[in-house]
Image (tube, rainbow, N blue to C red):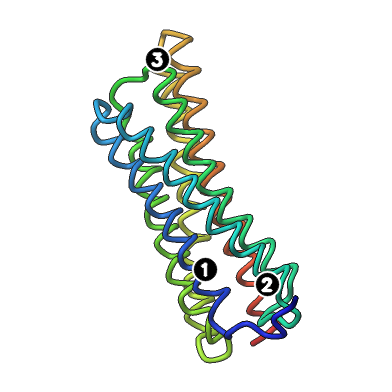
Amino acid sequence: MFNFQRKNTEFFDHFVESAKCFYRGSLILDEVMLDYTRAADKMKEIIDLEHEADAVNDQIIDELNQTFITPIDREDIFALANGLDDGVDFLQTTLQRIVIYRTGAAKAGVVSMTKLLLEATSELINAFELLKDIKKNRELILEATHKIGKLESEGDRVYRQEIAFLFDNVKDPIELIKWKDILENLEDTLDHCEDISDMIRGVVMKYA
């Protein structure tokens, strides 16, 4: 019933695949922020992507249940897999709000937040590709996680700046609530990227 040891790279390959789903979701969101008229069409794309991400996560969990010896701790594999899968859910939730709220064109600060997400998810791909050889790539992995931390900090700054702008300049309370909610979702997603990078850093500390 059990495979006593998966190929050393098998779980890591799945992580990379899942991280690419997270990045592609960020790209979809960025496209909508740049052209609101595409929002409804992009909703189907991100739903399909969420199903794809779920399938990758299910595959990781299935293989985890069938593997006796894993390349890193089982708890770490489980946490990383679910963390990546949840990232796409965050993005889907944000796009759903844009469609439901009928927000119209995105404000500059919201576009900036989405650009930060693109960079952060790209660095997650980089980190997971390097994770296959933790000892050899230790410094490069930590460099990627450090970049994600800096992007999250920049996201906090943009979020505070944009919230202040909303309260100073948007007189319609409904409009203010819409964009505040979307900004909070974007900030939560950037926080989630940092949470995943912290998990990666923890794995590096254990094995490098």
> Residue flagged by tag 2: what amino acid is it?
Gly
Query: Going by the image, does 165 lie left or right of 69?
Result: left
Query: Going by the image, does 3 lie left or right of 24?
Result: right
Q: Which residue lies under the disc numbered 2? A: 202
The residue at the point 53 percent across, 60 percent down is 149
Mark 3 vs 1, N-terminal side: 1
Does 79 sit above or below residue 47? below
Question: In the depicted view, which residue is nearer to us: 76 or 56?
Answer: 56
The residue at the point 44 percent across, 24 percent down is 179
Few, some or many residues within 10 Å of mark 3 (<14, 14–19, 20+): few
> How far apart are the alpha carbons under marks 2 and 3?
42 Å
Q: Residue furthest bottom?
A: 136
> Residue flagged by tag 3: what amino acid is it?
Val
Q: Which residue lies under the disc numbered 3? A: 170
Few, some or many residues within 10 Å of mark 1 (<14, 14–19, 20+): some
Q: Position of residue 67 (x, y in %)?
A: 71, 76
Task: State the mark number for residue 56.
Answer: none
Q: How many numbered callouts?
A: 3
> Residue flagged by tag 1: what amino acid is it?
His
Q: Which residue lies under the disc numbered 1? A: 14
Q: Secondary structure at mark 3?
A: loop
Does 190 sit above or below residue 126? above
Q: Position of residue 134 (x, y in %)?
A: 57, 85
Query: Going by the image, does 86 lie left or right of 74?
Result: left
Does 200 sit above or below residue 188? below
Please state, as top left, top right, bottom left or bottom right, where the C terminus lies in the image: bottom right
Query: Going by the image, does 20 lie left or right of 54?
Result: left
